Image (cartoon, helix red, strand yellow):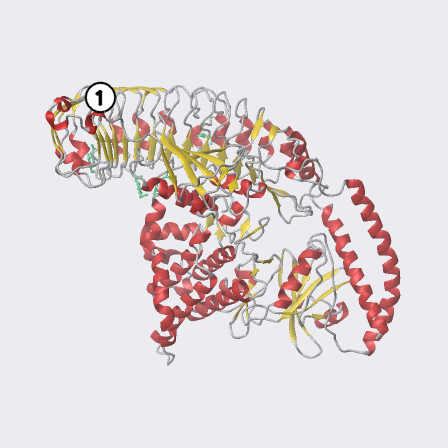
Amino acid sequence: MKLSRWWRWCHSWALVLCAILRHRVVDSATNQDDVNGLLALQDAWNAQNILQWTGNDPCGLQWPHIVCNDANPRRVIFLAVSGLSLTGTLPEDVGLLTALETLDLSQNELTGKLPPQLGKLVNLHNLRLQSNKFTGSIPPELGNLEQLQYMYLTSNRLQGPIPHEIGRLKNLYWFDIAGNGLQGELPYSSDGKNQMNVGLDNLTATRHFHFNNNSLEGSIPSAICHPDMALIHMLFDSNQMSGVIPDGIEQCLNLTILKLDHNKFSGTVPASVGKLVNLTELHLNSNQLTGELPDLTNLTKLNVLGLSDNQYAPSEFPAWMTSLVSLTDMQMDRANLEGPVPKTFFELPSLAAVNFDNNEVNGTLDLSTSKPSLLFLSLRNNNIGSTSLGNFDQELHLEGNPVCNTSAFANSQVCTQVPAALSQSYQSSTNCTNQCSMNSIPNPIDCSCAIPYKCHFTYRAPSFTTLSDRNHLKVFVNTVATNLNMSEMQIMVPEAFFNDQNQLFVSAWLFPNGTEIWIPEDVVRISSAAGNIFPPMFGPPMFQAEPYPFEWPTSTRGSGLNTGAKIGIGVGAVVIGLIVLGACIFAFVQKYHADKARSSRETYPASWGSGKTDSGGGLKLKGARWFSFAELKKATNNFNESNEIGSGGYGKVYRGELVTKEKIAIKRAEQRSMQGAVEFKNEIELLSRVHHRNVGGLVGFCFEQGEQMLIYDYMENGTLRDALYGYSGIKLDWRQRLHIALGTAQGLAYLHDLASPPIIHRDIKSSNILLDGKLNAKVADFGLSKIGPNDGKTHVTTQVKGTVGYLDPEYYLTQQLTEKSDVYSYGVVLLEMLTARQPIEHGTYIVREVKALLDKGGIAALRSILDPKLQHESMLEVQKFVKIAMHCTEESALCRPTMSEVVKEFEEFNAQELAEGGSTRSSKMFDGRTSMNKRQLSDSDYTAYSSKNSSRDSSFHDSAGFA
Ligand SMILES: *[C@@H]1O[C@H](CO)[C@@H](O)[C@H](O)[C@H]1NC(C)=O
Ligand SMILES: *[C@@H]1O[C@H](CO)[C@@H](O)[C@H](O)[C@H]1NC(C)=O
Ligand SMILES: *[C@@H]1O[C@H](CO)[C@@H](O)[C@H](O)[C@H]1NC(C)=O
Ligand SMILES: *[C@@H]1O[C@H](CO)[C@@H](O)[C@H](O)[C@H]1NC(C)=O
């Protein structure tokens, strides 16, 4: 008895030591260049107290704002420090971080030149340097970043030309250099100014050229439009560009927004513009265009047409104007229009705002047949002699027309009033009357004093031109709230207006909820995400924020221990370790003999205080057994290859049989990739607490002789992944797939709602779903799982982990983990079950591909990627399944269902399936749920889904980064 207690004491200590030592091993495992690179950044920004990067192991010590991969040594792949008011320059040593995939330094005060060493970050997908004070020119070395998909240099002070080398970015999807002082002509491959024969025309993957608000010169090279060019947004507005608009522009067939306003373009508008049939916005305002306007009859998707302020030949209202059936906003101020406005123009079904100021419009203004959509009409300074207004009672401006001298409009607002309030504000709550001091402002939630994060969004191409419709700001607030996971009450819009370049400027003050001040993590999150907020009809913003007055700790390097102290502790630990070890060897030998004599296995009751993240919490186990290494060695015939049933990044899985004939599966971590003691402990602790039919239960574990092993029930039918891809000889029919989908959902719903405390799995994928002999699904592998939020919080903030392809894009972006991240991954698994395709295959991402197919051809189009084994299934069935999958993979976590809702949907589904299959089980038992489910399903209806998506192209933008 005494001996066994002594032994337990020893064993606990050994485990503690292992944990400490292993931690140190992990410590030194971050790539040294990454360590040096990050420290160089911190030094250059003098930001020790802001970044809190202490010690010398970014990955092991989980420095804030970074994410590492699991390579050996570990590499830093993600760095986001948006909105922290960082000052200083970007040092050359940033080039050491060669594994980076995302670099987000946006919304800071960084100055100096962009170092050419940025060109060494060849793995970069996402480069976000917008809204700083960088000067100098764009380094040609950026052309080396062949993986790059997003380049944001927006709103800096960059000068000089766009380098030809940018044309080498074969994967570039989004190219945003707006709001700088860039000069020179647009480079193209055959302009004779470069030897490499490369230029903007080689960017065939790019959809967005956002070059507005610079000092770019010269004409639009015809070369940049050719049949392989996929551009949808060409924003060249507010530059110094000149020359004629080239005929060749018609080759940029996919353009939806063409903004050339506020330049010096001259000559006639070519007829080829009328062939860009997918245009929704065409802006040519404020140029020096002459001649007659071309026939735009075929631009039936056009919402906004801006033709103001040019020098066209005088002309009557062209007939094509009345065929622009989608037109909402028309601007033809100073456009040399003559004659009466055709009455039929006002019959356009969606027309909302029209400006014909400063022309020679005459005759009668006939609004008797205008549509209710019309909210704003301005015809100041024309020659209108009479009106027929019918029922029209919205904002109308006729100042400077002869009609104003008639009695009809004597003293009427129509002839005196200045155009509508130029600036609007919006707030969903009542006003507070109390005063606050300094930076504080009464929080609209409860009027307590709080410091808001003051954000400014400049929308460059909204598809409306006035704020007469107050719904726009409402939609804005709603979208911001949804995207940032806030309530609408937290958002105040003190000011919104169209600036003189027809860009919509919106200030939004974001208030913390329940506290006086935002914490830095929240500001980084908001700041990183805000540039991607595209409320419907608003289009892509330029985002800027006022530096937030954080309360940084006063002393630098204030927190954490200094390196000397750490080394001291390390040495101390080793010395104590040796002493304990000595004592333990003695005990071990004794124990070994004792164990042999007594072959019973005991439940392991350790109290295990381990790594730094665990302050005093011991290991709490219910029923998980401790196995000796020898025992497992025997069960697997010395880990014989023939018993291997799986392998992965962590190591191998073996089948084994205990002396009791009990079959087990043993997950044995590989020496090199052994998870930290903390993670290992995490998994044991979590698993020993969960007990559900659809959750893989833990039988026991072994932590001995440098081994980490977890022992589970053996699952005869292996992983779902193997079953789907035919590696395990099982063919899953439709019914079986439904059964597995339901089981998995039930397991997850249990973890989210019933486990105490709730558990977020974080790594749901087909290879983590196991199938027992009866094809019951069991959710397994809890290495990355997290205890869910409590204390009324809705999320936990954490570094992003998980498996590429299954990763929730919102989690990736915000680092906020909620159960909905599991829901997303589960949705991806559903798509995998449907198609028997990996989430990312041949460079395409399954979620995006399915969405695209549905958009294109509805459910029928899905046949092309359906698992051949399901080719004979009814598409009606498939459709229901897809609906659930698409609902789960909604981009916004808020829109996704909870797992228990999914369970209900599948239960209903299965019930119907059984009923239709002639089963005796009646679907009556699900009646209560049925009505509820109908409602839920209709929310995610395809029609709603596709119209929502086509109204903004942000969806692709946001998720593309993960594919
Ligand atoms: C760029 O495009 C031009 C014109 O298509 C082509 O001749 C040239 O080879 C391309 N350059 C590169 C580097 O791909
Ligand atoms: C233009 O859009 C269509 C439909 O979305 C697409 O099939 C085509 O590939 C696009 N063109 C280019 C050059 O990408
Ligand atoms: C316009 O867009 C539609 C749908 O995106 C696409 O199918 C079509 O090919 C485009 N038209 C042209 C001329 O590119
Ligand atoms: C509009 O499209 C029709 C049908 O494609 C074509 O015949 C006509 O010439 C086009 N009109 C103009 C002005 O491009």
Q: Specify the farthest residue to the front.
A: 434
Is 590 on the left or on the right of 213, as rendered? right
**Who is closer to the viewer here, 511 or 705?**
511
Instruction: Indicate the amino acid at tag 1.
Output: Asn
Q: Quadrant of residue 634?
A: bottom right
Q: Is residue 89 visible?
A: no
Residue 789, image x, y percentages: 56, 56
**Who is closer to the viewer here, 852 or 414?**
414
Q: Is residue 561 visible?
A: yes
User: Where does label 1 land, which residue?
Assistant: 358
Q: Quadrant of residue 429?
A: top left
Q: Is residue 943 above or below residue 541?
A: below
Q: Quadrant of residue 239?
A: top left
Q: Is residue 705 above or below residue 522?
A: below
Residue 24, image x, y percentages: 75, 49
Is 678 on the left or on the right of 844, as rendered? right
